[in-house]
């Protein structure tokens, strides 16, 4: 559910807006954090980006393989595929 904060910000000449410190603190957003941008009709939605498994989307027990993140469960499934061949 979308909740109005009552805060209005103008877009500058480079297309930027400033997220109020209260919102950043509440959502744990700090300088250099990646944000995902979604469009829903005429709404723009910003979401703090979290690292996820490239196969299932899980954010738990991640390992990096060739600069890609894979969770432990998917890693085990991949290992099973390799050992079956």
Image: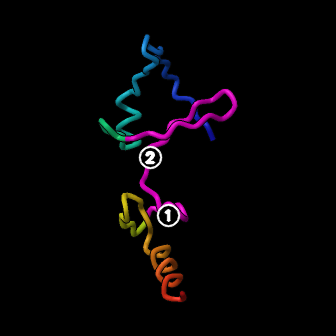
Residue 35 at x, y = what percent? 44, 39
Q: Quadrant of residue 27?
A: top left
- 11 and 56: which is toward the camera: 56
Q: Residue furthest bottom?
A: 84
- 79 and 8: which is toward the camera: 79
Q: Residues within 10 Å of mark 2 (few under 14, many from 20)?
A: few
Q: Quadrant of the N terminus?
A: top right
Q: Secondary structure at mark 1?
A: loop
Residue 79 belongs to the span the image colors magenta: no
Residue 25 at x, y = what percent? 35, 38
Residue position for label 1 = 58
Q: Which residue is depicted at the point 61% across and 37% down?
A: 2
Q: Which residue is depicted at the point 49% across and 18% down?
A: 8
Q: Is residue 2 left or right of residue 18?
A: right
Q: Residue furthest right?
A: 41
Q: Secondary structure at mark 2?
A: loop
Residue 44 at x, y = what percent? 58, 30
Q: Residues within 10 Å of mark 1 (few under 14, many from 20)?
A: some
Q: Quadrant of the C terminus?
A: bottom right
Q: What segment is highlighted magenta in the picture?
A: 34-59
Q: How much space separates mark 2 and mark 1, taking CA atoms?
A: 13 Å
Residue 66 at x, y = what percent? 37, 62
Depicted 4 relative to depicted 33: above or below: above
Residue 44 belongs to the span the image colors magenta: yes
Q: Residue furthest top?
A: 13
Q: Which mark is residue 49?
A: 2
Q: Which residue is depicted at the point 48% across and 76% down?
A: 73
Q: Which residue is depicted at the point 31% across and 39% down?
A: 30
């Amino acid at each position: 559910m979308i909740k109005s904060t009552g805060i209005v910000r103008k877009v500058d000449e480079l297309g930027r807006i400033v997220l109020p410190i209260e919102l950043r603190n509440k959502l744990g957003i700090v300088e250099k954090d990646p944000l995902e941008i979604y469009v829903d009709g005429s709404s723009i939605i910003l979401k703090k980006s979290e690292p996820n498994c490239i196969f299932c989307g899980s954010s738990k027990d991640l390992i990096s393989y060739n600069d890609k993140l894979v969770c432990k469960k998917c890693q085990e499934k991949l290992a099973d595929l390799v050992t079956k061949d």
